């Protein structure tokens, strides 16, 4: 009986020690990973600043107040065109799902999107 209690206490001590060792190893790994991430971000920031300093001057706006506001008309027109294209494709897919056939799978005609 006494040997069983001693054996259980010994196993509890060993398992507790192993659990503590695993936890400490996990913590040190996470701390190293966080430190490495901070160093990487600092290195990346320094590298971006060096690249920006090496850029020719005509890429950098000299006076942001004199720069014209960007026109959103082209962006809105392109977005409307893409939305109509996606809606047309969705209609074709819906038709194919409801009535599957080779003819309804491939559409004929219709304008395609092109970059000019």
Image: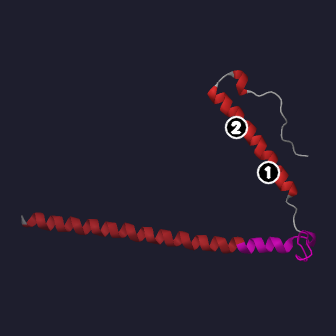
Residue named by callout 1: 79
Spatial CA distance of label 2 from label 1 is 16 Å
Residue 13 appears in which quarter of the rendering?
A: bottom left
Rendering coords of residue 8 (x, y %): 17, 64
Q: Earlier in the sequence, mark 2 or mark 1?
A: 1
Q: Residue at x 50, y 73 (%)?
A: 31
**In the rendered image, the vertical position of residue 108 relative to residue 8, given as above or below:** above
Q: Nearer the viewer, residue 111 or 116?
A: 111
Which label sits on residue 90? 2
- Segment tinted magenta in the rendering: 45-68
Q: Is residue 46 magenta?
A: yes
**In the rendered image, the vertical position of residue 110 relative to residue 86, given as above or below:** above
Coloration mode: secondary structure
User: Does 84 sit left or right of 41 as displayed?
Assistant: right
Residue 99 appears in which quarter of the rendering?
A: top right
Q: Quadrant of the N terminus?
A: bottom left
Q: Residues within 10 Å of mark 1 (few under 14, many from 20)?
A: few
């Amino acid at each position: 009986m006494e040997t069983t209690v001693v054996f259980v206490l010994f196993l509890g001590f060993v398992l507790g020690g192993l659990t503590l060792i695993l936890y400490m190893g996990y913590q040190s790994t996470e701390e190293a990973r966080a430190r490495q991430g901070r160093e990487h971000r600092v290195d990346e920031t320094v590298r971006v600043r060096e690249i920006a300093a090496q850029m020719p001057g005509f890429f950098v706006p000299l006076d942001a107040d004199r720069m014209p506001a960007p026109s959103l008309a082209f962006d809105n027109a392109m977005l409307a065109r893409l939305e109509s294209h996606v809606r047309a494709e969705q209609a074709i897919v819906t038709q194919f799902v409801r009535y599957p056939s080779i003819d309804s799978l491939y559409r004929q005609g219709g304008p395609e999107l092109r970059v000019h």
